[in-house]
Amino acid sequence: MASSGLSRRRVGGGASSSMAADDDEPAYSNGSPAMTRSTSSSGPGANSHAGSAFQGGNKIAFDPRDLEGANDDESRVGGKMPRLTIMEEVLLLGIKDKQGYLSFWNDNISYALRGCILIELALRRRIALVKDPNRRRVPLPDRLIEIIDDRQTGETILDETLKMMKATEEKMGINSWIDLLSGETWNVMKIGYQLKQVRERLAKGLVDKGVLRTEKRNFLLFDMATHPVADIRTKEGIINRTVSLLTATTSTIPPTALDKEGVQCRAMRAVCLVCAAYAASVLDNAFGRLTYEEREAAFQRCDDILAEFSCWPFGSGGPNEGATAAGRRRQATRIASGGAAEATGRECILGLMQEVRKEHSGEEDVGFELIAGVLEVLSKLDSLL
């Protein structure tokens, strides 16, 4: 075999009994020191895998150019991608832990997930609004979307949506794209734009990531594949971040309300998660440990957040402008009962607003402007369905 290709070599030496099976396994190399198994040292680290992409991982061959491309993408978007997308986190909040399925009475989640797809693509800097000065004359949900980077993301649903947008000659607005992806159209010529089985495909993606598992459950007349939670810590982490953000009573953001340090757009992702979960009617699943008063306060705070971030520039819509119908009813009830807290909700999210503004490049950031348009569409979801 030529030295420039992958070579198979057998490694000898003082391997422990637990690694005896590894001694007969091939180690692959392309001739570079980074991809060979170290044999020059002795002791516990003599058989360490220098070519592994992860510390202590198995032997794997990789192309260093792939890692360089990943680093370039992270530097371009401002951080590393989270383990789960916003769609997956919203779905995970809605799935029953042991039963492994969503509520049969939830009509909002399908539409909300399509909005999350656009949000995720915008956060990854794949799509944005058309940068036309005249766009401000058009309502925010009707502003046109364009592709700014057609590289694949590695997420099947995101890549399918990106491919569909690229193949479309006609530019369409935010509201139109969410409707088409949801199949909410009377135009039979555009029915092919509908993304089908999004919930099931997201669930299978979570199975591949080890968060869910697949079981078959009998429902009297038919059998159905269900996906109970396998990694409860991942779901608990999402719940803890959501509850921490919505139960904070000061403008300071609790550290537990955001994802890990270094994750791209942590503050904006936290906003999108709670707003999308609210629109998808799965947010109350995270409030199981809260009292009635705490739940009402958390819903009110989420409604305030949605009102502030469903307009562009963020925070320009006033304290209650753009709030959902449920939020307006809840506030009216509080006013009638004499327990209204006038504008304190807006003051509590000033810290969150400041963190989000650090993550975008001002009023000309057409990617974050697109996200604001999606949140405005989701804020009116009750009246749309």
Image: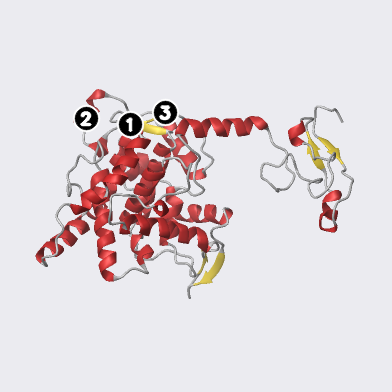
Residue matched to label 3 = 148
Horizontal side of residue 55 vs 190, given as left or right:
right
Residue matched to label 1 = 366
Disc 1 secondary structure class? helix
Give me the C-alpha separation between circle 2 and circle 1.
12 Å
Taking the view exactly as shown, the residue that stands out farthest to the top is 133
Q: In which quarter of the image is residue 143?
A: top left
Residue at x-position 24% and y-position 58%: 300
Give me the C-alpha separation between circle 2 and circle 3.
20 Å
Horizontal side of residue 334 vs 217, given as left or right:
left
Residue matched to label 2 = 136
Mark 1, other Cα within 10 Å: few <14 / some 14–19 / many ≥20: many
Label number found at residue 12: none
Choose the circle earlier in sequence order: 1 or 3: 3
Where is residue 87 shown, x and y percent of the image? 43, 50
Q: Which amino acid does label 1 sit on?
A: Val
Q: Nearer the viewer, residue 110 or 348?
A: 348
Horizontal side of residue 97 vs 25, given as left or right:
left
